[in-house]
Image (tube, rainbow, N blue to C red):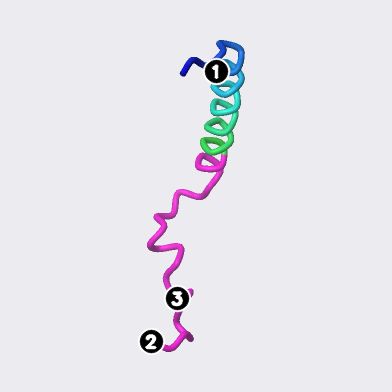
Amino acid sequence: MSIEPENIEQRVANLEAEVALIKSKLQSDSKTPWWEAIVGKFALRPCV
């Protein structure tokens, strides 16, 4: 199975764009650890 170089280049470019988007989202979040950010979010939900 051979993949055309142009197809690979396009796929890599798409992946690089997705990684850049994820990195920008991670960097823009606050520096609060995730476990502190969710404290109390489920306080009113009954345990099942």
Cα separation between marks 3 and 1: 46 Å
Question: Which stretch appears magenta?
Answer: 25-48
Determine if the magenta segment contains residue 42. Answer: yes
Determine if the magenta segment contains residue 43. Answer: yes
Which residue of the protein is positioned furthest toward the top in this rendering? 5
Q: Residue 40 — which label?
A: 3
Q: Quadrant of residue 16?
A: top right
Q: Residue 8 — which label?
A: 1
Q: Position of residue 28 (x, y in %)?
A: 56, 42
Residues packed near mark 3 inside 10 Å, few (<14), some (14 to 19) or many (20 plus): few
Of the residues shown, which amino acid type is indicated by label 1?
Ile
| Callout in the foreground (3, 1) | 1
> Residue drawn at (42%, 70%), measured in percent from left and top?
39
Of the residues shown, which amino acid type is indicated by label 3?
Gly
- Tag 3–tag 1 contact (CB < 8 Å): no
Near-viewer residue (23 or 31): 23
> Residue drawn at (56%, 36%), measured in percent from left and top?
24
Instruction: Report the residue marked by disc 2.
Output: 47
Sequence-first disc among 3 and 2: 3
Q: Position of residue 48 (x, y in %)?
A: 38, 87
> Residue drawn at (61%, 12%), measured in percent from left and top?
6
Q: Quadrant of residue 4?
A: top right
Q: Secondary structure at mark 1?
A: helix
